[in-house]
Image (tube, helix red, strand yellow):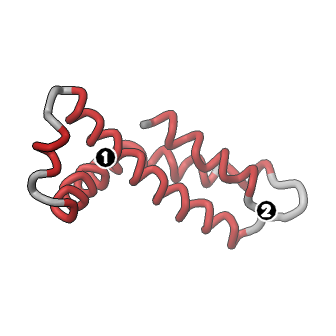
Amino acid sequence: MAILAFAVPRLLARVLPEGVTPLLLNAFLATLLLFVISSLFFFCLYLWQGVDFATIMEPGLAANVLFFGRLGVMAAIIWAPIMLLSVAGLPRKWVKETW
């Protein structure tokens, strides 16, 4: 997760233009992507540990989204500071815009 937290904003910076507004958009999109990735990571961990898909889906889709979403938010303790440092370092590589 730490490597992804560093890499996702850098990869998004390649497709987004330079500037303050795109930088904020980059931070927002990176947050959403890392949240989804970490939630899916926990879902896959449950499957890998031997819990059947049917057992996981028994409480319903909404309950699973809340449960794995909560786990994804808890994982933000790990990936959020790294992602913020990665986003904060992006203006150093700007060529057309200035900070």
Q: Which residue is mark 1?
A: 75
User: Which residue is outermost to the top?
Assistant: 49
User: Which of disc 2 and disc 1 is earlier in sequence?
Assistant: 2
Q: What is the three-letter code of the residue carrying label 1?
A: Ala
Cβ atoms at labels 1 and 2 below 8 Å apart: no
Q: How many marks?
A: 2
Q: Residues within 10 Å of mark 1 (few under 14, many from 20)?
A: some
The label shown at residue 1 is: none
- On screen, residue 20 versus residue 72, left or right, reads right
**Secondary structure under the numbered disc 2 in the rendered image:** loop
Q: Is residue 95 above or below residue 41?
A: below
Q: Which residue is depicted at the point 61% across and 67% down?
A: 25
Between residue 81 and residue 38, name the one nearer to us: 38
Q: Is residue 94 above or below residue 78?
A: below
Image spot of residue 33 (x, y percent): 48, 54
User: Percent position (x, y) of residue 15?
Assistant: 74, 55
Quadrant location, the N terminus: top left
In the figure, residue 41 lies in which quadrant? top left
Q: Secondary structure at mark 1?
A: loop
* Vertical side of 92 occupied by 16: above or below: below
Residue 76 spot, x, y in % from top left: 35, 50
Q: Nearer the viewer, residue 68 or 8?
A: 68
Drawn side of residue 79 relative to residue 83, left or right: left
Residue placed under numbered mark 2 in the picture:
18
* Label 2 Cα neighbours within 10 Å, binned few <14 / some 14-19 / many ≥20: some
Residue 50 in the image: x percent, y percent? Answer: 16, 27
Q: Is residue 75 above or below residue 24?
A: above
